[in-house]
Amino acid sequence: MLTQNPAVAPAQQVVDARQESQIWTAFALSASLRHNDLKVSVRDGKATLAGFVGDSVRQDLARQIALKVAGITAVENHIEIRPTFTPPGAAAEPAFGEMVDDATITCTVRSKLLWSRHGEELAAHVDTARGRVSLTGVAESIEARDMAGKLAANTQGVSSVDNQLSVESPRAGVARSESSNVIDITDVADGWITTKVKTELMTTKGVPSTDISVTTNNGIVTLTGVVDTKAQVNKAIACAKGIKGVAKVDSSALTSRN
């Protein structure tokens, strides 16, 4: 915590407190640092860090994060390296960074279900706790249920999926959930398809999205680039094919090194 000094102007105290809060928040959002008991103080643009980490990589990461905060001109890094140091185990309540991660995963999975080819067959609720996704609600087919579970499992940050979707025949008048059929997409524009395919690639495990270029023309998605393995090529193709509005995927220009 920042200790106010009478010799420091009130306006500077506010700036110091804001910068301290930004650094602490960045530590809390970092999966590599959030469970370490790190302390931060800031005075006149100089950040002082203290605490313990297990290696020099985390020590330097903390320093680099602090330096990225606007107005921080120097970092005095008193974080000690203790190779035998083990961060405290997970608390009963999730940490701030974990809650942000979970909210991000939930929104990402919802978006994937919405834009999937089987999105209109789902009335699904998505919930995430420490990377574990739970799917509840109704699917109109086994294929739609299994697709929902697969999309969730392939999402970045997801550690496990509890797919409790029940398979039921569609019934008239049954409203769908937040994750499906929110908008009526009868003629998806090429620009929207390109955006959704790129998003799907970025949020899918095992796909080097930065190495893949995506374009769409009349619903035909073209993937170009070079990735490491054939498995990555196949995964990218599957991602594109699963997006609503995609008529065909041309992957002839997407190759692998191995």
Image (cartoon, grey):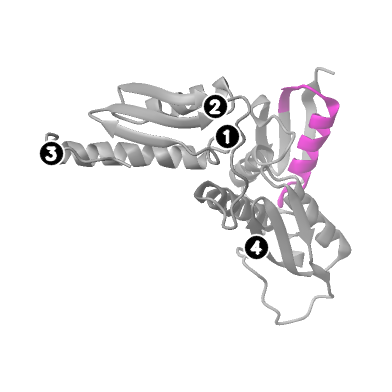
Mark 1 and mark 2 in contact (Cβ < 8 Å)?
A: yes
Residue ID for mark 1 = 32
Disc sitting over residue 227 in the figure: none
Mark 4 residue element:
loop
Q: CA distance from mark 2 to mark 3?
A: 34 Å
Q: Is residue 235 magenta?
A: yes
Mark 4 and mark 3 in contact (Cβ < 8 Å)?
A: no
Q: Which residues are magenta?
A: 224-246
Mark 2 vs mark 4: give the one in front. Answer: 2
Mark 2 residue element:
helix
Write the residue at 49% across / 42% down: 28
Mark 3 residue element:
loop
Q: From this viewpoint, is residue 215 visible?
A: yes
Residue ID for mark 3 = 6
Dot 1 alpha-carbon crowd within 10 angstroms: few under 14, some 14 to 19, many 20 or more:
some
Say what amino acid the circle numbered 3 marks: Pro
Disc nearer the start of the sequence (1/3): 3
Residue ID for mark 2 = 58
* Rendered view: 6 above or below 126: above
Q: CA distance from mark 2 to mark 1?
A: 7 Å
Q: Nearer the viewer, residue 3 or 12?
A: 3
Say what amino acid the circle numbered 1 marks: Ser
Residue ID for mark 4 = 179
Say what amino acid the circle numbered 2 marks: Arg
Q: CA distance from mark 2 to mark 4?
A: 37 Å
Relative image position of residue 105 (x, y in whole percent): 62, 50
Say what amino acid the circle numbered 4 marks: Ser
Write the residue at 25% across / 31% down: 43
